[in-house]
Image (cartoon, rainbow, N blue to C red):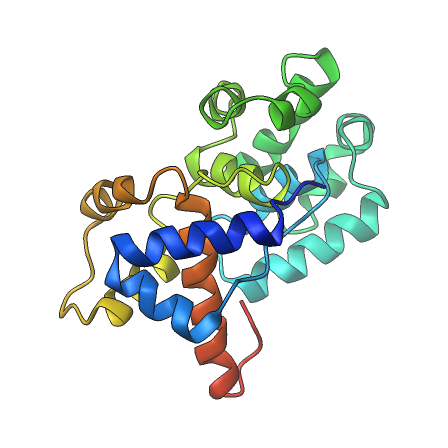
Amino acid sequence: MTAPSRATIQSACEALSVIDPALARAYDIVGVPDWRTHAPSYALLARTVVYQLVSTRAADAIWVRVEGFLGEVTPERVLSCDQDKLRACGLSRPKLSHMNTIADAIAEGALDLARVEAADVDAARAELLAVKGIGPWTADLYLLYAAGKVDAFPHGDAALMEAHRRLGGYEQRMANKAFSMHAERWRPYRGVAAHLLWGWVNTERAKAGIPPA
């Protein structure tokens, strides 16, 4: 797995603090945030698909069943398993279809995760988005967690938008498009900004005795 160095993250936090008062406040509270890392793998893409548009609790339960059924979640096992039994783990038909198309793309070489990790963020994102079943949110989270891209950014992430609203003292949360436009000023460190905001969210959750998100 790949993650930027602590020195890189700290330098980015300092630059972001000059640009945006909300991020400056987050940095004052959180300090240098830990980078969320996962092994670059088909399993991470499949897991992200499972977690889309459902509650975390429901997705946790589904993913546990998927892992229990498949053992190691690989393209080969997904493509060769009994599809009805896999769907019985709680997967909707679209999610199962997406897991299969992503597995096909990797098996056929159309999607090369090593190439994605080595490419610049825009080229890496384009390769991921070319695969049916990988949407912007899935692609951006993969680029953050598995490829350590400091400028990848999960557009439309409600937790980030709400954190920025509260830290900035805004009465209303920005709409998705407005927030994405606002985030343009954070380039080339939008991924670090995301981690600062997530870090603040988890600090607030810890105060309330809630497990981290």
Percent across and percent down for residue 123 are 49, 19
- Left or right side of 2 for 199: left
Above or below — where is 103 with respect to 160?
Answer: above
Percent across and percent down for residue 151 are 44, 38
* Residue depicted at x 46% and y 38%: 152
In front of the other: 54 or 142: 142
* Residue depicted at x 46% and y 62%: 198
In front of the other: 184 or 172: 184
In front of the other: 85 or 202: 202
Figure label count: 0
Give the position of the N terminus as an image quadrant: top right
Above or below — where is 72 with respect to 77?
Answer: below
**Residue 53 seen from this side:** no
* Residue depicted at x 19% and y 72%: 169
- Left or right side of 84 for 25: left
Percent across and percent down for residue 202 are 49, 72
Q: Residue furthest right?
A: 71
Percent across and percent down for residue 124 are 53, 24
* Residue depicted at x 35% and y 39%: 187
